[in-house]
Amino acid sequence: MVRPFTVTMLAVLASSSPLAAPGVQQHIDHVQHGLLPPVLVAGEPPKAIELAARLAELQVPGVSVAVIHAGKLEWARGFGVVRPGGAPVTPETLFQAASISKPVFAAAVMSLVQAGKLNLDTDVNQYLTSWKVPDNKYTQDAKVTLGELLSHSAGINVHGFEGYAAGEPVPSLVQVLNGMRPANNAPIRVGSKPGTGFSYSGGGFVIAQQTVMDVTGVALPALMHDKVLAPFGMQHSTYQQPLPAERRAEVAAPYGQNGLEVTGGPHVYPELAAAGLWTTPSDLANFAIGIQQALSGKSQRVLSTATARTMLTPKVELHALGVLTGGSPEHPYFTHGGANEGYRCELIAYDAGDGVVVMTNGDNGQQVIDEIVRTVAHEYGWADFQPPTRTLAKVDSKVFDHYVGAYTLPTGEIATFWRDGDHLESRIWGQPVVELFPSSQNEYFAEDVDARWRFSPATEQDSTAVASLNQFGSERSARSLSGSEAQAAIDASLAIAKRFKDQTPDPRGEAVLRHLIAGIVKGAPEYSELSPSFAQLTRQVLPEVQRSLIPLGEVRSASFLKVGAAGDDHYRVKFASGSREFSIILDPDGRVYSVGLAP
């Protein structure tokens, strides 16, 4: 039975694991009772957040956490429940790892490379027997290789996979590769010249999966068990899809954005290498420790030091083989996130021996993941992921009037600033309103998100004022709009705030959404009616979205659900054969700024 998620149904409980040492227990208590905000203010106590309250607010039933310290699994705990009213989450509760399946699979590929059975630079068509990568104009001068598939640089389409709901027919892997029914994805093909740039592709990992199976003659679940899961001590993990019936009691049930259990339970993902792993945070921690030990030469159970280093060496941008790398030369780390229907998760591991794995059974789980990661990072003094500390300055609120206006970022996004009494507030279009606090007369920071603005007034040499945004480790300069344009943008931001407060939809939204859906189904949306960035994204994902909407038939009705804080109007659209929830944001010019689609 599908039940709505309510606060009263949720009780956050720590699992019944053995008692931790006093210092470790303090770390656990801080995660459970003192999640940290995105920004700390010097001299002020942090606005600590109860994990129970956050899970209830986000409509996420449960979360499981495993922390690595000094090369060992230091602690693992479950919080919340497998479903409202159900059993508590424990460290042994199973979650879908989603795209974290990719680095675990990559380790198996690297073990085969190490054994001389595969080569990262060989045309995969030389290995494939049951299917071939179709040649086209992009492959005339460059062939697809395993190294490119694992680093998302092979030019392969199909970003990710929806999975198959309970009772739906599940395609074979060749049907997935060819995009043939009952597969629900577009045909997996080369869409740009291999080796010329990064383009995330779950489809590329499906090609790699077929390659490994053709070369070894072994089904992937058995191969993964023997090559990686068993050697790394991942005793609860499996790539079996669907999960065997006798293990379903171990599962945390998946929950959608609306707080309802995914109908029929977990989706089935035949795209095992890309999204098919069932596991626990402790098992993924053991995987990370195995890689760390290989890097340091302490163990070569699966990979040698040289092979592990090859796996973690970036091939394109920061993307290595199956993982994203980051950090400084002194403190490098590898990481990957995951998002399957009803599940969100993340793995972060420093090469030198610290790390964390967080897994949730809710589509809204990313926010609590971020909060747990930064709290753990703060607890253990990591070089990255900690919330920054800002210093609050005393500034007369009248100074804020100098910065009231609107600015255009290089991406075309509009940032607006206005004074509300003694508060300076701001919105980047498509995001919620944030209050800004002064660190000096012309520098301001947000507390709800790690973002800083520095204002530079117009000069005799340059009549345009500039506002520089520092966020995500980079700085972008935005140039001021003219008086009338700026006021129109500010008015639009204030109108969104009022619509959010009153929960009234944009009067244009439903008609625009219906028109866009019709255009997508026909394969010819009106790109001039979309913002430039959204038009570009739509061109990239059109075949996949079109393929998912066509079977639903014609639109019968659209019912308004709510207005989000970002100005996103949510609608439940009923089709002839099913329904979907959409969110839509229009930009100040009335063009479609973004659209979200949920089951």
Image (cartoon, rainbow, N blue to C red):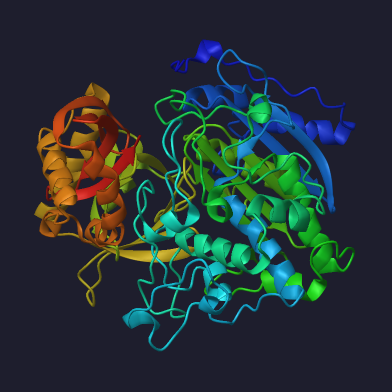
Q: Residue at x 75, y 24 (%)?
A: 15
The C terminus: image quadrant: top left
The foreground one among 17 and 21 is 17
Looking at the rendered structure, the number of numbered marks drawn on it comes to 0
Q: Residue at x 18, y 48 (%)?
A: 521
Q: Determine the residue located farthest toward the bottom in the rendered image.
A: 141
Location of residue 513 in the rendering, given as x and y in whole percent from the top left corner:
16, 40
Q: Residue at x 23, y 78 (%)?
A: 461
The foreground one among 479 and 340 is 340
The relative height of residue 575 versus residue 542 in the rendered view (above or below) is above
Location of residue 475 in the rendering, given as x and y in whole percent from the top left corner:
43, 65
The foreground one among 516 and 494 is 516
Q: Does residue 15 show up? A: yes
Would residue 335 appear left or right of 304 to someone viewing this image?
left
The relative height of residue 46 versus residue 123 in the rendered view (above or below) is above
The relative height of residue 420 versus residue 212 in the rendered view (above or below) is above
The foreground one among 267 and 485 is 267
Location of residue 85 in the rendering, given as x and y in whole percent from the top left corner:
58, 12
Q: Does residue 353 show up? A: no
Location of residue 199 in the rendering, given as x and y in whole percent from the top left corner:
43, 67
Q: Residue 310, located in which quarter of the rendered image? A: bottom right
